[in-house]
Amino acid sequence: MVSHSEDPNAHYGPVVTSAHKERVEGYIDLCIEEGAELVYDGRTSQIPDNSQGYFIGPTFFDHVTKDMRSYQEEIFGPVLQMVRAKDFN
C-alpha cells in the first residue's frame, strides 16, 4: 500500500542496486546544495525487517526552481519536488 511515509502499513520497496541508492542519495544532496528546502528526508527512514535491501524512504523537497539540475533530470527514486507557481497561466 502506498501512503504517507510514516504510515506503518505503507509499502515502499528498495531501489535495485547499491549504485542506484548512491545515485538517488547524490541527487538528494544536490537538491540541498542547490537550495531546495528539505521537508522530509527519506535517507533516515528505518525499514523494519529489511536490513539487507537498498532502501531509501520517500523524500520531499519544497521551493524547487526550474533552473535546478534536480528539476531538469529524472531521479528514478522516491523523491518528490514541489515547484511553486504564482498562477496556472
Image (cartoon, rainbow, N blue to C red):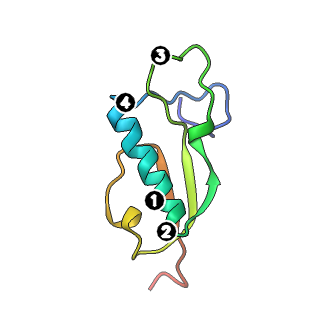
- Looking at the image, which residue sits at the far top? 49
Q: Quadrant of residue 16?
A: top left
- Residue type at mark 1: give it: Leu
Q: Classify 35 as above or below 9.
A: below
Residue at mark 4 to residue at mark 3: CA–CA distance: 11 Å
Give the residue at mark 2: 34
- Residue type at mark 2: give it: Glu
Mark closest to the chain's N terminus, 2 or 3:
2
Q: Classify 72 as above or below 4.
A: below
Residue at mark 2 to residue at mark 1: CA–CA distance: 6 Å
Where does the image place residue 58, in percent across and percent down from the top left? Answer: 54, 42
Q: Are marks 2 and 1 in contact (CB under 8 Å)?
A: yes
Give the residue at mark 4: 18
- Residue at the spot x=57%, y=41% of the render? 42
Q: Secondary structure at mark 3?
A: loop
Where does the image place residue 25, in percent across and percent down from the top left? Answer: 46, 45
Left or right of 36 on screen, residue 15: left
Mark closest to the chain's N terminus, 3 or 1:
1
Q: Secondary structure at mark 1?
A: helix
Count of labels in the image = 4
Depth check, front residue: 6 or 21: 21
The label number, if any, that marks residue 30 in the structure image: 1
Count residues near mark 2 (Cα–Cα under 10 Å), then give few for <14, some for 14-19, many for 20+.
some
Residue at mark 4 to residue at mark 2: CA–CA distance: 24 Å
Where does the image place residue 63, in percent across and percent down from the top left? Answer: 57, 70
Q: Secondary structure at mark 4?
A: helix
- Residue type at mark 4: give it: Ser
Where does the image place residue 69, in percent across and percent down from the top left? Answer: 37, 67
